[in-house]
C-alpha cells in the first residue's frame, strides 16, 4: 500500500455501545481513486465504521485521516468543509420527503453552494439523467417513487456535487437482482466519470465483486482479510470462505440461541 | 428501602440530565439564530404553517372562550349586581391569560406534535444524518427556523385570538344578555391598559418558543422507529403544555406581582 496516496486512512478505530464492543481497533486504507468494499455479516459493525468515518458517530479511540488531515474531533464548521468532499448513499435512501425529487438532488448545490434555483434545477435534471431518470421524475415527491427509483435518486443526490469520495451503505439491499445490478452498473459508471474514491459496505457479494477494486472483510471489529476483488475466491481464509459460500458451519459463529 | 432511595435518586438524576440537555439544545438553537447561513425558505414555510394554518383552530377556540366568558361572568356577577363588569372581565381575561394560554396549548397540540413527528421521522430514516453528509448543519436547517417562526408567529396569532375572543364576548353580551353595543365597547376599552396586552404578547412569544423547542427537541432525540416517533410526539405535546402552564404563572408573577 502506498502510504502517501491514501485518500482515507483509518487507524485503531474503536467504538462500543455499553458493554458491546463493535469496533476493536480497525485499520483501513483507501487509496486515491480506489474502490474498496467492506463485507461482513449483519451486526458486525460495518455501518458503525462508516458513521465513525463520516463523523456521525464519535469513536472512543483511533484516527481517521482524509487527504492526510485528521478529521476526528474537528469543530463542526471544519467538519462541514471536509464533508463537502464527500457524498453518501444511505441504505434507506434517506431522501428528504418534504422536498421534491429535483430539490433533493440539488440540495447541496442550493443550500451549500447557494446556486440559484433554476441553475440548480438544470444541474439536478442532468444528474437525474445520468442515473437513467427522466426530467418528469424531478417533479415527483420521494414517497411516490419505488424503492429502486429512490435508490437512483439517492445516488444522484450523492454525486450531484461531484464529490471526491463517495460512501455506499448497502447500495443493493432490498432490491430485486436485476435492479441491484442496474444500481451496481450506475455506481461503477458514475464513479468512473467522477474519478471518485469510494468506500462501500455490503453483504451482497455479487455487488461487491462488481464494484470493488479491493475487498476487505470485517469480523469482530477488525479487518481480518483484504485483497484484490478477483482474489476473493482464493483467499485461503476460512472466515472469508465461509462468508462467500454462505455456510452456517465454520469459524464464524452466529449468535443464535437454539 | 435501599432500592427505593436508589430509584428516587435515579429519577432525579435523569431529570437533571434531561433539563441540562434541553437547556443546551435551546442555547445551541438560539445561538444559530445569530450565525449565517440562514434558510429563508424554511423559515417562511414554518411561519405559514404555524401562523396561517393555525388560524382556524385558534380562532374557534378564541370565539367560544370569549362567548362563554361573557355568559359565565354575567350569571356570576348578577348575584351581586355587577353585570357592568362583564366587558372588562372578558377583555382582561382574554388578553392577559386565555388568549396566550389557549393559543399556546392549541398550537402545542397542532404544531409541537407535527414538529416532533416530522423531525423524529427524519431522525429514524437517516434524513438528519443525510443533512450532515450534505454539509448542512441540521440544527440550523431544522431547529432554528422553527424556533424563530414559533417565537414570531404566536404573538400574531394571539393578537387575532384576542380580537376574536372580545368579539365573541360582544356577540353574547349584546345579542343574548341585552347590553347596549356602545356601552359594551366602551366598557371593553375603558379599563384595558397597555400592559395587559404587552404581558399577553410576551407570554405568547415565550410559549411559541417553548412549543417549537420541545417539538424539535423530542423529535431530534427520538429513537427506535415508529414507536419512538410516537413517544416523541406525545412527550413534545405533554411537556410543552406543562411548561406553558408553569411559565404562564412565572411571567404573570414577573409582570403583575406587587
Image (cartoon, helix red, strand yellow):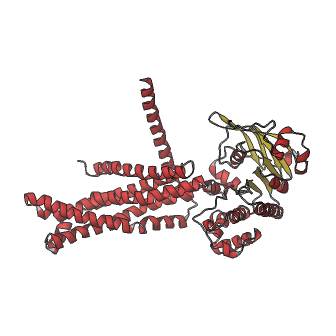
Closest to the observer, B75 or B22: B75
Closest to the observer, B58 or A108: B58
Q: Position of residue B67 (x, y in %)?
A: 23, 66
| Residue at x 45%, y 28% (from the top left corner) | B6
- For the C terminus of chain A, the image quarter is top right
Q: Position of residue B69 (x, y in %)?
A: 22, 62
Q: In the displayed orientation, state which residue is furthest to the left.
A: B81
Closest to the observer, B172 or A78: B172
Q: In the displayed orientation, state which residue is furthest to the top.
A: B1
| Residue at x 39%, y 55% (from the top left corner) | B206
Name the image quarter holding residue B38.
bottom right
| Residue at x 71%, y 74% (from the top left corner) | A134
Q: Position of residue B243 (x, y in %)?
A: 38, 49
Q: Is residue B99 left or right of residue A71?
A: left
Q: Is residue B147 left or right of residue B205?
A: right
Question: From this viewpoint, is residue B34 visible?
Answer: no
Question: From this viewpoint, is residue B39 visible?
Answer: yes
| Number of on-image labels | 0
- For the N terminus of chain A, the image quarter is top right
Name the image quarter holding residue A254.
top right
Q: Position of residue A27 (x, y in %)?
A: 79, 40
Amino acid at each position: 500500500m502506498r502510504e502517501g496516496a491514501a485518500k482515507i486512512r483509518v487507524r485503531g478505530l474503536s467504538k462500543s455501545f455499553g458493554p458491546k464492543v463493535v469496533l476493536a481497533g480497525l485499520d483501513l486504507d483507501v487509496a486515491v481513486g480506489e474502490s474498496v468494499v467492506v463485507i461482513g455479516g449483519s451486526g458486525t459493525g460495518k455501518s458503525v465504521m462508516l458513521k465513525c468515518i463520516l463523523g456521525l458517530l464519535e469513536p472512543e479511540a483511533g484516527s481517521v485521516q482524509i487527504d492526510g488531515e485528521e478529521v476526528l474531533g474537528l469543530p463542526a464548521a471544519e467538519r462541514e468543509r471536509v464533508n463537502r468532499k464527500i457524498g453518501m448513499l444511505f441504505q434507506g435512501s434517506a431522501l428528504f420527503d418534504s422536498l421534491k425529487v429535483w430539490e433533493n438532488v440539488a440540495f447541496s448545490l442550493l443550500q451549500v453552494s447557494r446556486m440559484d434555483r433554476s441553475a440548480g434545477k438544470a444541474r439536478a435534471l442532468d444528474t437525474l439523467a445520468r442515473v437513467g431518470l427522466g426530467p418528469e421524475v424531478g417533479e415527483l415527491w420521494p414517497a411516490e417513487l419505488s424503492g429502486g427509483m429512490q435508490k437512483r435518486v439517492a445516488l444522484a443526490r450523492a454525486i450531484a456535487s461531484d464529490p471526491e469520495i463517495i460512501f455506499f451503505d448497502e447500495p443493493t439491499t432490498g432490491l430485486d437482482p436485476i435492479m441491484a445490478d442496474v444500481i451496481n452498473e450506475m455506481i461503477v459508471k458514475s464513479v468512473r466519470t467522477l474519478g471518485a474514491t469510494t468506500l462501500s459496505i455490503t453483504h451482497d457479494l455479487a455487488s461487491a465483486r462488481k464494484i470493488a477494486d479491493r475487498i476487505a472483510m470485517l469480523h469482530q471489529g477488525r479487518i481480518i482479510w483484504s485483497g484484490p476483488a478477483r482474489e476473493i475466491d482464493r483467499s485461503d481464509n476460512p472466515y472469508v470462505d465461509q462468508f462467500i459460500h454462505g455456510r452456517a458451519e465454520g469459524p464464524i459463529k452466529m449468535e443464535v440461541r437454539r | 428501602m435501599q432500592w427505593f432511595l436508589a430509584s428516587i435518586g435515579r429519577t432525579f438524576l435523569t431529570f437533571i440530565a434531561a433539563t441540562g440537555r434541553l437547556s443546551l439544545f435551546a442555547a445551541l438553537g438560539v445561538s444559530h439564530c445569530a450565525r449565517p447561513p440562514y434558510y429563508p425558505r424554511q423559515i417562511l414555510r414554518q411561519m405559514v404553517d404555524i401562523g396561517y394554518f393555525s388560524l382556524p383552530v385558534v380562532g374557534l377556540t378564541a370565539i367560544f372562550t370569549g362567548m362563554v366568558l361573557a355568559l359565565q361572568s354575567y350569571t356570576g356577577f348578577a348575584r351581586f349586581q355587577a353585570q357592568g363588569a362583564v366587558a372588562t372581565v372578558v377583555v382582561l381575561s382574554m388578553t392577559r391569560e386565555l388568549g396566550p394560554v389557549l393559543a399556546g396549548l392549541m398550537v402545542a397540540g397542532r404544531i409541537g406534535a407535527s414538529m416532533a413527528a416530522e423531525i423524529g421521522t427524519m431522525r429514524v430514516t437517516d434524513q438528519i444524518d443525510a443533512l450532515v453528509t450534505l454539509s448542512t448543519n441540521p440544527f440550523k436547517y431544522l431547529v432554528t427556523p422553527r424556533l424563530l417562526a414559533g417565537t414570531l408567529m404566536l404573538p400574531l396569532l394571539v393578537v387575532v385570538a384576542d380580537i376574536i375572543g372580545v368579539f365573541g364576548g360582544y356577540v353574547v353580551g349584546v345579542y343574548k344578555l341585552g347590553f347596549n353595543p356602545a356601552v359594551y365597547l366602551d366598557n371593553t376599552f375603558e379599563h384595558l391598559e397597555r400592559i395587559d396586552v404587552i404581558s399577553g404578547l410576551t407570554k405568547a412569544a415565550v410559549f411559541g418558543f417553548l412549543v417549537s423547542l420541545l417539538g424539535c427537541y423530542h423529535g431530534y432525540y427520538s429513537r427506535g422507529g415508529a414507536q419512538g416517533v410516537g413517544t416523541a410526539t406525545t412527550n413534545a405535546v405533554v411537556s410543552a403544555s406543562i411548561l406553558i402552564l408553569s411559565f404562564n404563572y412565572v411571567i404573570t408573577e414577573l409582570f403583575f406581582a406587587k
